[in-house]
Image: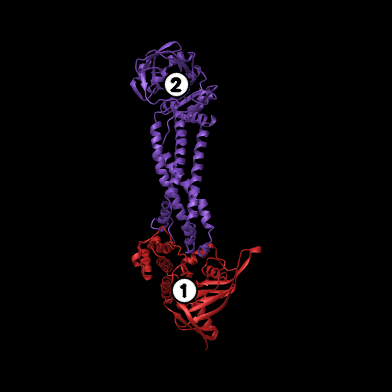
Chain colours: A purple, B red
C-alpha cells in the first residue's frame, strides 16, 4: 500500500513536472494566489491592526477594574460619571485606590492660526492611571506642571508644533508641549493629547466633580471577581468591568457594531474566493490538458488515492510558491504601513494562519480537478 | 479423464472469459458489443485477437483487462473474478495482474524512460532503489538499457513502444494486453516490437494477448482468435513461425516473407 504523500513517490515528481511544464499557466496561477493572499493579508492585517488600535488606551491603562457609565460602548464614548462613585468605590472592601480619567474632544488652536480637533486624555499624574507611553522626549512627571501636555511626534505637523517647549491653545488656554511620544496614534486620526486630570477637565469643559471613567486598583490579595460584584452592587447607573471585559466591549463595538470589521472580513473573504476560483480554474485546465496521462495512470492500475496525491501535490506546490511571494509582499506592506494612521499588523500566528488558509484554498481548489479525473473511463486510452 | 483435463486448463489459465456479454449505451443507443464470448489465455502463449473495425476487439480487451465489467458472463484474472468489482477493485486487479501496451504508447512526456517504467511500480506502492533496479532491468529486457534518461520526445516510435512494453512487464504482470502495438510503427520497428512481445510470451508464467488487424504479425503468434460482430468466429493455432496453422480439423500452411513480414502464400490441407 502506498504511503500517503510519500516524497519518494513519483506522484510528487509528476505533479511538479505537470506544474512546471506550462510556465505561462504557472505564472498566471501564482499571480492569482499572490493577489488573493496579499488581499487577505491586508484585510486581516487591517482587521487585527484596527482591533489592536481601538483598545490601545485600555491596554495601556494600569488598573484592575473599570467603572464606566452604564451602557458605554467604548473608551471613546464619554458620558460623565459623578465623583460620588469614586468615593463609594473607595469604601468597598478590597479596593485600594480609585483614580479618575477624563476624556473628551477639544479644539487645538494652532500657533500659526486655525484649529484642529484633539482628543484629550487626563488622569492623576501622581497615581497609576492612564499616562503617555513610548516617551521619546521629556518626562511624564512634567505633566504635573500646569498647562503642560504630551503629544505624539506623528502629529507635529497637524498640531503646528516642532518639539518640546512648543505652545498652542486649547479652549483659549495656553498649552505647552512637555512630553513627546512615538507611535500613539488614534484610529480616528484625531491626535491624542495627554495632560493632568485638572487640565483635562478644563480643556474638555468637564465639571470638577465629573469624570469619564474610574480606574479601580485592588488591595493586595483581593479577589477581582468578588470586588467587581461588590462594586456593581454598591454603585448605581454604572457598570464595573475588568480590563479584559472593557477591551472586548470596545473591540466588539468598533469592529462589529460599526460594520468596520465586517467590511474588512468581507474583503478577506473576497480574496479567498477570488484565489480559490483562480487556482481551481488553473488546476482544472491543467488536469484537462493532462487527461490522457491521468487516464493512462488509471489504466495501469493506479488507485484513486494515487491520482489525488498527484493533483493535491500540484495544489500544495501552488500554495507554497504563491504564499512565499505573497508573504514577502505582505511583510513589505506591513513595514511600509507601520507609521501610518492604521498600520497593518502581521503576527507569527497570523502568518501561520494565512499559510494554512492558502493550503486550504489550494486543496479545496483541487476538488473540481479530482472530480474530473475520477470520472475518467480508463478505456479511453484505447481510442486516444 | 475429460473432466480432469478441463480442471487443469482452468487452473492454468491466466485470463478466462466465459459467455461474456457486454452491452454499451442504453435505450436507442444500446449496442451489444460482445455476444457471449468465451476466451482463455494460457501462460507461455502469444495470442492474436483479430477482427475488422467494430467487431468488438477493443471492448473485449477492455473487459479482459478489467477496465469494465461484463454485462453477463464472467471474467477471471489469475483466479480473481471481476464480478461486482467497483472502479477501485478493478484498478487493483489491473495493477496486480495486467500490463498494458497501447497503440499510441501513452508515455508521460515529462518523465524520462526510467521514470515512465518506474511509474508502474510506483502506483503499486513500490518505491526506492529496488524499484529503480527493476525498472532498469525491464528496460534492459527490451534493449533500452542505454536510454534510461531519455524523454519520450527523444525516442523513436519503436523505442517509445519498447518503453511502454517495459512498463507493462516491470510489475511481473501475468497478462500482457497489447492494443495494436505495431499500428503506429513502420514494418521494421513493428517486427522488432513483435519479437520483444513474442520473447516475453515465452515466459511460462505470462500470457500475451495482442489485438491487431495487421497480418504481418501473424507469424509471431502461437494462436489466432478471430472476432466478428461481437462473437468469436474462429481460432487457429500456429505450430511454427513459418509452419502450419490448425483450423477446425484442417491444416493451414502459411509461407511468410520475413523481410516484409507478410503472408505470401497459404494452403489448406486435410489433417
Question: Foreground residue, A26 or A374?
Answer: A26
How crowded is the residue under tag 1: few (<14 C-alpha within 10 Å), some, or many (20+)? many
- Same chain for the residues under marks 1 and 2 in the image: no
Residue A142, can we see it? yes
User: Quick check: B201 left or right of B236?
Assistant: left
Mark 2 is surrounded, within 10 Å at the Cα level, by few (under 14), some (14 to 19) or many (20 or more) other residues, namely many
Which image quadrant is residue B3 in? bottom right
Which chain is home to disc 1? B
The residue where tag 2 is placed is: A98
Q: CA distance from mark 1 to mark 2?
A: 95 Å
Identify the element where label 1 is drawn.
strand
Of residues A59 and A26, the one nearer the viewer is A26
| Residue in the picture at 50% in, 83% down | B266
Q: Which subunit holds the residue at mark 2?
A: A
The residue lying at 46 percent from left, 33 percent from top is A46
Q: Is residue A214 left or right of residue B155?
A: right
One can see residue A364 in this view: no
Amino acid at each position: 500500500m502506498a504511503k500517503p504523500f510519500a516524497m519518494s513517490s513519483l506522484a510528487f515528481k509528476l505533479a511538479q513536472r505537470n506544474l512546471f511544464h506550462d510556465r505561462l499557466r504557472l505564472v498566471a496561477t501564482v499571480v492569482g494566489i499572490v493577489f488573493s493572499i496579499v488581499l487577505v493579508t491586508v484585510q486581516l492585517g487591517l482587521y487585527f491592526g484596527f482591533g489592536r488600535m481601538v483598545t490601545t488606551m485600555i491596554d495601556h491603562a494600569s488598573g484592575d477594574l473599570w467603572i464606566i457609565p452604564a451602557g458605554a460602548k467604548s473608551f471613546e464614548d464619554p458620558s460623565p460619571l459623578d465623583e460620588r462613585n469614586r468615593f463609594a468605590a473607595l469604601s468597598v472592601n478590597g479596593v485600594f485606590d480609585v483614580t479618575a480619567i477624563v476624556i473628551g474632544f477639544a479644539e487645538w488652536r494652532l500657533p500659526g492660526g486655525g484649529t484642529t480637533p484633539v482628543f484629550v486624555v487626563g488622569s492623576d499624574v501622581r497615581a497609576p492611571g492612564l499616562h503617555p507611553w513610548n516617551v521619546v522626549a521629556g518626562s511624564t512627571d512634567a505633566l504635573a506642571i500646569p498647562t503642560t501636555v504630551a503629544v505624539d511626534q506623528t502629529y507635529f505637523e497637524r498640531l503646528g508644533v516642532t518639539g518640546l517647549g512648543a505652545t498652542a491653545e486649547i479652549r483659549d488656554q495656553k498649552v505647552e508641549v512637555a512630553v513627546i511620544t512615538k507611535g500613539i496614534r488614534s484610529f480616528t486620526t484625531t491626535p491624542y493629547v495627554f495632560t493632568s486630570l485638572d487640565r483635562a477637565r478644563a480643556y474638555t469643559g468637564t465639571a470638577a466633580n465629573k469624570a469619564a471613567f474610574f480606574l479601580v486598583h485592588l488591595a493586595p490579595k483581593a479577589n477581582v471577581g468578588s470586588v467587581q460584584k461588590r462594586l456593581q452592587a454598591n454603585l448605581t447607573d454604572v457598570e464595573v468591568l475588568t480590563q479584559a471585559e472593557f477591551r472586548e466591549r470596545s473591540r466588539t463595538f468598533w469592529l462589529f457594531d460599526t460594520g468596520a470589521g465586517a467590511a474588512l472580513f468581507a474583503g478577506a473573504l473576497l480574496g479567498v474566493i477570488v484565489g480559490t476560483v483562480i487556482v481551481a480554474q488553473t488546476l482544472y485546465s491543467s488536469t484537462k490538458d493532462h487527461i490522457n496521462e491521468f487516464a493512462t495512470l488509471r489504466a495501469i492500475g493506479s488507485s484513486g488515492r494515487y491520482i489525488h496525491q498527484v493533483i493535491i501535490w500540484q495544489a500544495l506546490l501552488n500554495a507554497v510558491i504563491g504564499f512565499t511571494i505573497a508573504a514577502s509582499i505582505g511583510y513589505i506592506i506591513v513595514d511600509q504601513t507601520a507609521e501610518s494612521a492604521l498600520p497593518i499588523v502581521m503576527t507569527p500566528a497570523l502568518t501561520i494562519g494565512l499559510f494554512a488558509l492558502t493550503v486550504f484554498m489550494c486543496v479545496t481548489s483541487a476538488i473540481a480537478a479530482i472530480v474530473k479525473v475520477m470520472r475518467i473511463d480508463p478505456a479511453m486510452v484505447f481510442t486516444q | 479423464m475429460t473432466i480432469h483435463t478441463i480442471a487443469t486448463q482452468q487452473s492454468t489459465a491466466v485470463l478466462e472469459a466465459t459467455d461474456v456479454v457486454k452491452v454499451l449505451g442504453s435505450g436507442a443507443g444500446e449496442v451489444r458489443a460482445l455476444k457471449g464470448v468465451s476466451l482463455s489465455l494460457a501462460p507461455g502463449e502469444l495470442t492474436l485477437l483479430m477482427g475488422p473495425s467494430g467487431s468488438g476487439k477493443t471492448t473485449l480487451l477492455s473487459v479482459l483487462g478489467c477496465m469494465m465489467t461484463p454485462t453477463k458472463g464472467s471474467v477471471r484474472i489469475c483466479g480473481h473474478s471481476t464480478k461486482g468489482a467497483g472502479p477501485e477493485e478493478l484498478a487493483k486487479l489491473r495493477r496486480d495482474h495486467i500490463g498494458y501496451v497501447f497503440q499510441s504508447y501513452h508515455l508521460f512526456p515529462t518523465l524520462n524512460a526510467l521514470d515512465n517504467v518506474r511509474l508502474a511500480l510506483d502506483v503499486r506502492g513500490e518505491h526506492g532503489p529496488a524499484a529503480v533496479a527493476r525498472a532498469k532491468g525491464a528496460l534492459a529486457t527490451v534493449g533500452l538499457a542505454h536510454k534510461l534518461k531519455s524523454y519520450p520526445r527523444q525516442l523513436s516510435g519503436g523505442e517509445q513502444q519498447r518503453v511502454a512494453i517495459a512498463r507493462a512487464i516491470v510489475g511481473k504482470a501475468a497478462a500482457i494486453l497489447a492494443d495494436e502495438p505495431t499500428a503506429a510503427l513502420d514494418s521494421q520497428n513493428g517486427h522488432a516490437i513483435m519479437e520483444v512481445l513474442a520473447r516475453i510470451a515465452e515466459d511460462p508464467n505470462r500470457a500475451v494477448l495482442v489485438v491487431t488487424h495487421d497480418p504481418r504479425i501473424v507469424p509471431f503468434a502461437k494462436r489466432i482468435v478471430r472476432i466478428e460482430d461481437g462473437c468469436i468466429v474462429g481460432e487457429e493455432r500456429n505450430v511454427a513461425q513459418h509452419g502450419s496453422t490448425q483450423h477446425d480439423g484442417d491444416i493451414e500452411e502459411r509461407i511468410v516473407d520475413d523481410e516484409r513480414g507478410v503472408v505470401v502464400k497459404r494452403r489448406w490441407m486435410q489433417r
